[in-house]
Image (tube, helix red, strand yellow):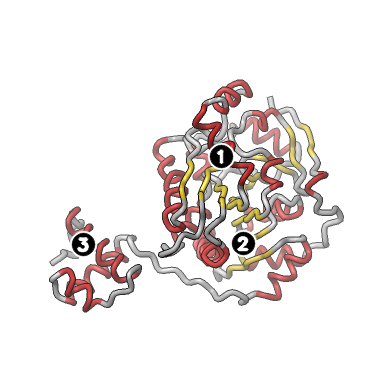
Amino acid sequence: MVSRNKPLSSEQLGLVVKSARMYHEQKLSQAEIAEQLHVSQSRVSRWLSDAIKQGIVRTIVVAPSGTESDLEEAVAARYGLQAVIVADPGTDDEASVIRSLGAAAAGYLEVTLTGANRVGLSSWSSTLLATVDAMAPKNVKTAESVIQVIGGVGNPTVQVRATHLADRLASVTKATPRYLAAPGIVSSREGRDALFADPFVAEVAAEWDRLDTLLLGIGSIEPSPLLRDSGNSLGEGELSNLAKAGAVGDVCLRFFDNHGTLIHSDLNDRVLGISPEQMLKVGRRIGVAGGSRKYPAIKAAVEGNWVNVLITDKNTALKLESEKAPTRPFAEEHHEQRTVLLS
């Protein structure tokens, strides 16, 4: 019998995982599992309980689509978005918002991925990590490929999370993963160009022109703990200069002001990732973000057309809906730039 007071051994963990897969993925009853594994049903019940306690199985609540349909339609109409999905975490706590957004985004992806999608994926986002962890594996292929669109190499202590993000999404969709084995930002344009010349990096980068879906986090001017610890964030001096130039947020380290106008700087020549022009050509650009800290960045991202599908929390959606309609048209072909010198 599995002890409640001692860590599980590798053998015990293996049986816990096996029983959890049989119960949650294969939809076998506890009695059927017990029969196949030649154990008692009570032991299977304890294993399933251990799976939850160990974080192997995570329980999420996915609200039915249409729960906030009026609000979703109002925000979509105001900002010219293809779709808006609103989650209601019931609290402003950032961790709760992230979990709620992850569940909502997982539900959206599970019903909208067709099997032929080529999905571009940002590397450093806690919200996207929550999304892929909330997705249930399917018995059919729901995407063709999952491709990192910004370098996923960084501090080894957190790099595993960027790898997990791509691995997990590819696993649950049965897609082919393509990893960008390079840092997200380098010290010079020459360094970036040298990395882009590497055959393996060039092969991944060539896929960016073939994407039909982008799954993106929206960053505030202050980097998230995950991005900061990854070694791919900017120094305090560069962030200060960006803030002085009016930057409020970024998508894949492409910073923009409060209207969504790209702030052009030498930083854009040092990012090893999808270009602004390539991003704007992707037909479906899904932004998953919420919380009061990120509100200015979220508003700018939708106003600047960086994302055209927004998955956010109810409080953010209500604030977006209450804003005056943007005065500028959502025209990709006339996406503006502001220039700022960071060095």
Give whichever of 136, 2 is nearer the camera: 136
Distance in Å between CA atoms under marks 2 and 3? 37 Å
Amino acid carrying mark 1 in the image: Ile
Q: Residues within 10 Å of mark 3 (few under 14, many from 20)?
A: some
Residue picked out by circle 1: 150
Badge count: 3
Amino acid carrying mark 2 in the image: Ile
Q: Position of residue 96 (x, y in %)?
A: 51, 63
What is the quadrant of the C terminus in the image?
top right
> Residue at the location (71% across, 46% down)?
280
Q: Position of residue 101 (x, y in %)?
A: 55, 62
Q: Which residue is the extreme one toward the front?
A: 116
Closer to the observer: label 2 or label 3?
Answer: 3
> Residue at the location (62% across, 39% down)?
274
Res. 93 visible in picture: no
Dot 2: what SS? strand
Residue picked out by circle 2: 311
> Residue at the location (59% across, 32% down)?
235
Residue picked out by circle 3: 15
